[in-house]
Image: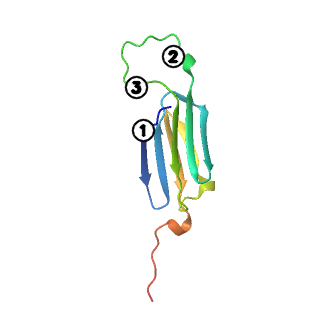
Amino acid sequence: MFVPVTDIFETDDALTVMLEMPGVAKDRVDVRVENDVLTIEGQIDFGVYENLRPLYTEYNVGNYARTFQLSSRIEQDRISAALKDGVMTLVLPKVERAKPRKIHVN
């Protein structure tokens, strides 16, 4: 298993996690949350590479896996995921109490 290269961005409303998983098809991805752990796994169809004899390669071909411990600041029921062009994008919405807010002073 390879650990996908990952970038994480934060806004006031959510965290966005982007993972590079080249060669992984949408139907071969498993994204799940269990016990406050977000797990992302992607399986490669090795049949595509069966008859290829590379002359030069810059990365190895294999399956991907990555886990993240989630805090109570993430609304786990609203996590969304999309895969496009080998990049998995997950949006982890923050719970209301974790969002910045202005406090009125009397």
Q: Say above or below: 56 vs 67.
A: above
Tag on residue 88?
Answer: none
Bin the neighbour count of mark 1 within 10 Å (Cα to Cα): few under 14, some 14-19, many 20 and up: few
Q: Earlier in the sequence, mark 2 or mark 1?
A: 1
- Please tell me which residue is depicted at 56% across the width and 44% down the height of the picture: 39
Residue 67: image location, x then y, percent: 52, 45
- SS at mark 1 in the image: loop
Tell me if residue 31 comes above or below residue 59 in the rendering: below
- Residue at 61%, 49% in the rendered image: 33
User: Element at badge 3?
Assistant: loop
Label 2 crowding class (10 Å Cα cut-off): few <14, some 14-19, many 20+?
A: few
Between 21 and 104, the one lying in front of the other is 21
Percent position of residue 91, x then y: 53, 50
Residue 86, percent from left and from top: 49, 32
Residue 59's tag is 3
Give, as a three-letter code, the residue at label 3.
Answer: Tyr
Q: Amino acid at mark 1?
A: Val
The residue at the point 58 percent across, 59 percent down is 75
State the residue position of label 1: 5
